[in-house]
Image: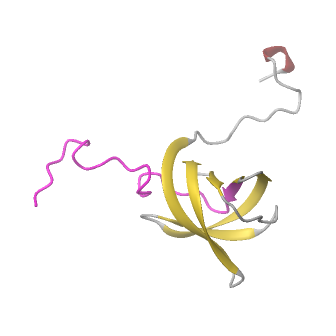
Amino acid sequence: MSPDEGHPADFKPRRAPRRCVEGSAELSHACRYKVEVKVHDVSTAGFMAECTDRIRIGSHVSLDVPGIGPVRAQVRWQLGGRMGGMFLDPISLSRCEWTAEPAEAAGETVEA
Protein backbone atom coordinates (compact mmCIF):
# COMPACT_ATOMS: atom_id res chain seq x y z
CA MET A 1 0.00 0.00 0.00
CA SER A 2 1.18 3.50 -0.57
CA PRO A 3 0.64 6.92 1.03
CA ASP A 4 -1.68 7.59 -1.91
CA GLU A 5 -4.07 4.97 -0.47
CA GLY A 6 -4.34 6.79 2.86
CA HIS A 7 -1.54 4.97 4.69
CA PRO A 8 1.77 6.43 5.87
CA ALA A 9 4.88 5.56 3.83
CA ASP A 10 6.14 3.19 6.57
CA PHE A 11 2.80 1.28 6.76
CA LYS A 12 3.23 -2.51 6.77
CA PRO A 13 0.19 -4.70 6.13
CA ARG A 14 -0.33 -7.71 8.41
CA ARG A 15 1.49 -10.83 7.29
CA ALA A 16 -1.36 -13.19 8.14
CA PRO A 17 -5.14 -12.70 8.17
CA ARG A 18 -6.69 -12.71 11.62
CA ARG A 19 -9.65 -14.79 12.74
CA CYS A 20 -12.02 -13.46 15.41
CA VAL A 21 -12.34 -15.86 18.32
CA GLU A 22 -13.64 -15.79 21.88
CA GLY A 23 -11.58 -18.06 24.05
CA SER A 24 -9.82 -18.16 27.39
CA ALA A 25 -6.23 -19.28 27.73
CA GLU A 26 -3.38 -19.31 30.19
CA LEU A 27 -0.44 -17.02 29.46
CA SER A 28 2.78 -17.74 31.31
CA HIS A 29 6.26 -16.30 31.54
CA ALA A 30 8.87 -18.87 32.58
CA CYS A 31 8.12 -19.66 36.23
CA ARG A 32 7.38 -16.06 37.13
CA TYR A 33 3.65 -15.84 36.53
CA LYS A 34 0.56 -17.37 34.96
CA VAL A 35 -2.46 -15.28 34.07
CA GLU A 36 -5.79 -16.00 32.44
CA VAL A 37 -6.38 -14.03 29.22
CA LYS A 38 -9.34 -13.68 26.87
CA VAL A 39 -8.18 -14.16 23.30
CA HIS A 40 -10.10 -12.03 20.79
CA ASP A 41 -8.29 -12.85 17.57
CA VAL A 42 -5.62 -15.18 16.32
CA SER A 43 -3.62 -15.77 13.15
CA THR A 44 -0.87 -18.14 12.19
CA ALA A 45 1.58 -15.43 13.29
CA GLY A 46 0.08 -14.03 16.51
CA PHE A 47 -2.83 -13.12 18.76
CA MET A 48 -4.63 -10.26 20.47
CA ALA A 49 -5.94 -10.78 23.98
CA GLU A 50 -7.47 -9.00 26.91
CA CYS A 51 -5.28 -9.15 30.02
CA THR A 52 -5.74 -7.34 33.32
CA ASP A 53 -2.06 -7.71 34.29
CA ARG A 54 0.68 -5.50 32.86
CA ILE A 55 3.08 -7.54 30.77
CA ARG A 56 6.32 -6.00 29.64
CA ILE A 57 6.56 -5.36 25.90
CA GLY A 58 9.28 -7.59 24.48
CA SER A 59 8.68 -10.33 27.08
CA HIS A 60 8.80 -13.93 25.90
CA VAL A 61 5.69 -15.77 27.04
CA SER A 62 3.82 -18.99 26.37
CA LEU A 63 0.14 -19.04 25.35
CA ASP A 64 -1.73 -22.32 25.90
CA VAL A 65 -3.64 -22.69 22.62
CA PRO A 66 -6.42 -25.34 22.73
CA GLY A 67 -5.64 -28.17 20.31
CA ILE A 68 -1.99 -27.15 20.00
CA GLY A 69 -0.68 -26.68 23.53
CA PRO A 70 1.84 -24.11 24.79
CA VAL A 71 3.05 -21.80 22.02
CA ARG A 72 6.00 -19.47 22.57
CA ALA A 73 5.37 -15.83 21.70
CA GLN A 74 6.78 -12.36 22.21
CA VAL A 75 4.61 -9.52 23.55
CA ARG A 76 4.68 -6.80 20.88
CA TRP A 77 2.29 -4.24 22.37
CA GLN A 78 -0.02 -3.53 25.28
CA LEU A 79 -2.60 -0.77 25.38
CA GLY A 80 -4.88 -0.55 28.38
CA GLY A 81 -6.22 -4.03 29.03
CA ARG A 82 -5.35 -5.36 25.55
CA MET A 83 -2.13 -6.88 24.33
CA GLY A 84 -0.73 -8.38 21.16
CA GLY A 85 1.74 -11.19 20.79
CA MET A 86 3.73 -12.60 17.89
CA PHE A 87 4.24 -16.37 17.80
CA LEU A 88 7.92 -17.29 17.54
CA ASP A 89 6.94 -20.18 15.25
CA PRO A 90 3.74 -19.97 13.15
CA ILE A 91 0.83 -22.16 14.23
CA SER A 92 -1.67 -24.16 12.18
CA LEU A 93 -5.17 -22.73 12.52
CA SER A 94 -6.61 -26.07 11.44
CA ARG A 95 -5.23 -27.60 14.66
CA CYS A 96 -6.39 -24.70 16.83
CA GLU A 97 -9.70 -25.50 18.56
CA TRP A 98 -10.69 -21.82 18.46
CA THR A 99 -10.66 -21.77 14.65
CA ALA A 100 -10.93 -25.41 13.53
CA GLU A 101 -14.00 -26.28 11.53
CA PRO A 102 -16.25 -28.75 13.37
CA ALA A 103 -16.32 -32.20 11.74
CA GLU A 104 -20.08 -31.92 11.14
CA ALA A 105 -19.64 -28.67 9.22
CA ALA A 106 -16.93 -30.28 7.10
CA GLY A 107 -19.46 -32.80 5.80
CA GLU A 108 -18.47 -35.64 8.10
CA THR A 109 -20.91 -37.49 10.30
CA VAL A 110 -20.01 -37.75 13.96
CA GLU A 111 -21.24 -40.92 15.65
CA ALA A 112 -21.81 -41.11 19.39
Is residue 26 found inside the magenta-colored segment of the image?
no
Is 73 on the left-hand or right-hand side of 106? right
Q: Position of residue 56 (x, y in %)?
A: 81, 65
Q: Is residue 71 above or below residue 106?
A: below
Query: In the rendered image of this protein, does residue 107 appear above or below residue 28?
Result: above
Does the magenta stretch mainly form a helix, a strand or a loop? loop
Residue drawn at x 88%, y 33% is 10
Tell me which residue sits at (81%, 18%) in the image: 6
Q: Say left or right for 66 vs 89.
A: left
Q: Nearer the viewer, residue 39 or 7?
A: 39
Residue depicted at x 84% and y 14%: 4
Return the x and y of residue 72 as percentages of the image width and height.
Answer: 64, 68
31 displayed left or right of 70: right
User: Farthest left residue?
Assistant: 112
The answer to whether residue 72 is above or below residue 39 is below
* Quadrant (top left, top right, bottom left, bottom right) of the N terminus: top right
What's drawn in magenta, residue-wise?
A: 84-112
Q: Is residue 27 above or below residue 10?
A: below
Q: Residue furthest right?
A: 9
